[in-house]
Amino acid sequence: MPKGRPMRHHNGYGTIVKLSGNRRKPFEARVNTRMDERNYPVYDVLGRFEDKDAAILALAQYNKDPYDVQTDKLTFKDVYELWYKHKFEDSKKNYSRSSVDCTKGAYNKCQVLHSKYFKQLRAADLQMVLDNYSLSHSYMEHIRNLFNQMYAYALEYDYVNKNYSDFAKITKEEDDQPGVPFTPEELELLWKNKDKPFVDTILLFVYSGWRIGELVPMPLDNIDLTEKTFKGGIKTAASKDRIVPIHSKIYDMVCKYVNKGTGALFSDSDKPIRTTQAYYPYFNQALVNAGITTEHTPHDCRHTFATLLDNAGANTISIKRLMGHSSGGDVTEKVYTHKDIEQLRIAIELIK
């Protein structure tokens, strides 16, 4: 081989081409990845580099671990559209209108990422979106869920090598929904009228702290009348699959609803109530039945639960676990021991 001439690579390895003109990055690395309609090889540009050594290194790395060059050019928008078609259009599963709308809304809030190459995104890019405190906590949860699903899809189809959504966290306090806790006088009215239609369901929320979207659709298998516990939760890792002891004051109410046998915790006669939207009219009517004139929402029950625990002197860690708030530890490996549950039971029974 003549002195000074670079070693010739084998066919299919790729080439380095120096582009004409005064360019900041004149060295282009090319690889043949496919054939055109005439069965001639077509090259893709691996990248452009400031010096030849950098281009040679990129070519060597590609040949060591080949990948679809075209996927490197997929933007956040491209991957979203591919994933959206895969999930909502190609799937045989029927998704609700609200699920689709929440997904589209979450995507629209990621406008700053739309034109960025998906493979070049890092945790800091995703975190920048989640650190936008002008968004509600629930919107942030939809966005983070979107990140998780898009990265799972991208990993499956080799668009990325690492799931950076695992490192993106919601730092805003979880219970950012405004709420007005029930007053002691209103709680007294609820207990006084607990036998009137659906008044007791408000007490179930007040004495358990569940969100409406957690308790109404809760599977009956998640209610253990022997161990006297609920299991459920949505939203964050700290909130999911949490265990809440059934307060002794509402135990008989829980038994009444579970034993109705409708397959749902709440029901109107033999008609199960499975969605939050379906429950709202019953909640509002229950307020009227109890003689409460102040406007309340089901989320006010959760604020009331937190207030009652705090006023009763429950320890901070127990309150956070009952509410499903992160305590700063590793909630992804959350395990409830018998001792843990008893500590939570002690805390919840402080509420009178």
Image (cartoon, rainbow, N blue to C red):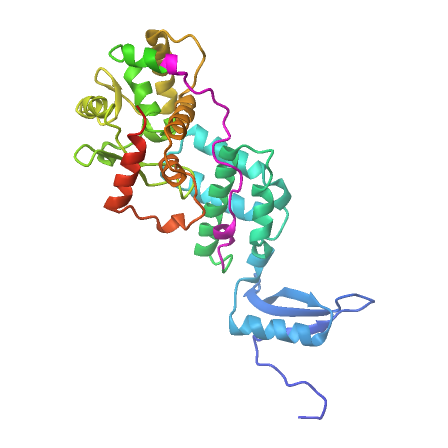
Q: Where is residue 170 in the image (x, y as percent from the top left)?
A: 51, 42
Please state if 333 lies on the left or on the right of 338 as rendered.
Answer: right
Q: Please check the rendered image and state whether residue 333 is part of the magenta-colored stretch, yes or no.
A: no
**From this viewpoint, is residue 283 visible?**
yes
Q: In this view, does 150 lie above or below 175?
A: below
The quarter in which the C terminus is drawn is top left
Q: Please state which of residues 38 and 287 is positioned toward the viewer in this rendering.
A: 287
Q: Where is residue 125 in the image (x, y as percent from the top left)?
A: 60, 50
| Magenta stretch, residue numbers | 162-186
Q: In this view, does 64 lie above or below 342?
A: below
Q: Position of residue 149 (x, y in %)?
A: 45, 46
Please state if 260 lies on the left or on the right of 30 as rendered.
Answer: left
Q: Please check the rendered image and state whether residue 170 is part of the magenta-colored stretch, yes or no.
A: yes
Q: Please state which of residues 46 and 352 is positioned toward the viewer in this rendering.
A: 352
Question: Seen from this angle, which residue lies furthest right?
Answer: 22
Q: Please state which of residues 226 and 235 is positioned toward the viewer in this rendering.
A: 226
Please state if 306 lies on the left or on the right of 68 as rendered.
Answer: left
Q: Please state which of residues 35 and 4 is positioned toward the viewer in this rendering.
A: 4
Magenta stretch prevailing secondary structure: loop
Please state if 270 lies on the left or on the right of 38 as rendered.
Answer: left
Question: Seen from this angle, which residue lies furthest front?
Answer: 313
Q: Where is residue 299 in the image (x, y as percent from the top left)?
A: 42, 24
Q: Residue at x 50, y 24 (%)?
A: 178
Q: In this view, does 155 lie above or below 57?
A: above
Q: Residue at x 49, y 60 (%)?
A: 161
